[in-house]
Image (cartoon, rainbow, N blue to C red):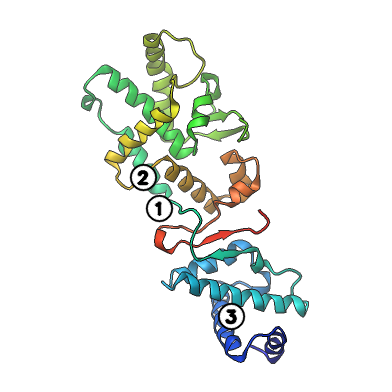
Amino acid sequence: MNEACKLYRLKKGYSDKTIKTQNHHIKSFLNWCIKQSITPENISYTQALQFIDHERGRNITGASVINTINSIKIYFDYLVYIKAIRHNIIRQIKLRNQAKKALPEILTTRQLGTIYKNFSGIPHWKHKTTRAKLLHERNTVILGLIIYQGLKSSEIARLEREHVNLKEGNIYIPSSRKSKARTLKLQSDQILPFKTYLEETRPIILEKLKSKTPYLFPSKKYSDMIGKIVTQAKMISPELKDSRQIRTSVLINWLKTNNIRQVQYMAGHKSIKSTESYRKEDLTDLTKQIELFHPMK
């Protein structure tokens, strides 16, 4: 680190010992930038989170990660001071040693797909009654909407028959007080179960219920129905914990392959801040979680 940067920090009240520790952290950061072909002065918010992920991957303590980021913040303050950069993007990140709310273990896209296929692949002969077979066909469609479209029980409850367009291969999710309307693509392995449900299963269920409801999945208690579906899926796929885990995994996986505005639309979030809260690293080890959030929330 150059002498001017050291002098800047001395004037800010940092001791020689502290500056020496800061230099070690900053050097580690700059070396990582070189390996990633990143110009430190142009680093993005997402890239800064990737560096934190790299640090956590070294199995160091949460406090050590915090100290490292604080040192880099001070270095970027110096870059602003000498007008090498206009803004200190590192100060957009705040870390705490313990997360306010622990995220569930994140499931990959492949794991989610396997959970759906394991559930949908249960052979018909395993169902002891016709009713059980019909309900499984319905439940397969619902689980697919949770796994592939990331829908919540309240959103599933509002779906109507006319919202499904198998010809176009998509489904319309109506708006609510808390979410915006959107149209989402159906995955290829959802089409046949959906077709069977719409043309065969649902008419029989409606007939048995003596109902003409427009809702896609007639039910009095949607949360209970979805809870039972997830419980059944857990029996086949023990890595599955609950529906919250599925939605969290879906949104985090979307953020890996789509820009944040696209994910905001797909998730039905009214505010970009809601989407930003999912912009975290893969938090597979709950004991190492560190909360990352934008201070402008």
Give SS at disc 3.
Answer: helix
Inter-mark Cα distance, 3 to 2: 39 Å
Find residue 134 and report its image quarter.
top left
Residue at 69 percent across and 86 percent down: it is 5
Q: Spot the residue most to the right.
A: 83
Q: Which residue is mark 3?
A: 26
State whether residue 218 appears in this view: yes
Residues at circles 3 and 2 in contact by the CB criterion of under 8 Å? no
Residue 32, image x and y in percent?
54, 75
Residue 144, image x and y in percent?
42, 34
Q: Which residue is mark 1?
A: 105
Inter-mark Cα distance, 3 to 1: 31 Å
Q: Of callouts 3 and 2, which one flags the residue occurring earlier in the amino acid sequence?
A: 3
27 in relation to 221, above or below: below
Residue at 57 percent across and 30 percent down: it is 173
Q: How would you rate the neighbour count of disc 2 (Cα within 10 Å): few for under 14, some for 14-19, many for 20 or more?
A: some
Find residue 11 and report its image quarter.
bottom right
Q: Of callouts 3 and 1, which one flags the residue occurring earlier in the amino acid sequence?
A: 3
173 in relation to 43, above or below: above
Residue at 37 percent across and 30 percent down: it is 140
| Foreground disc of the pair 3, 2 | 2
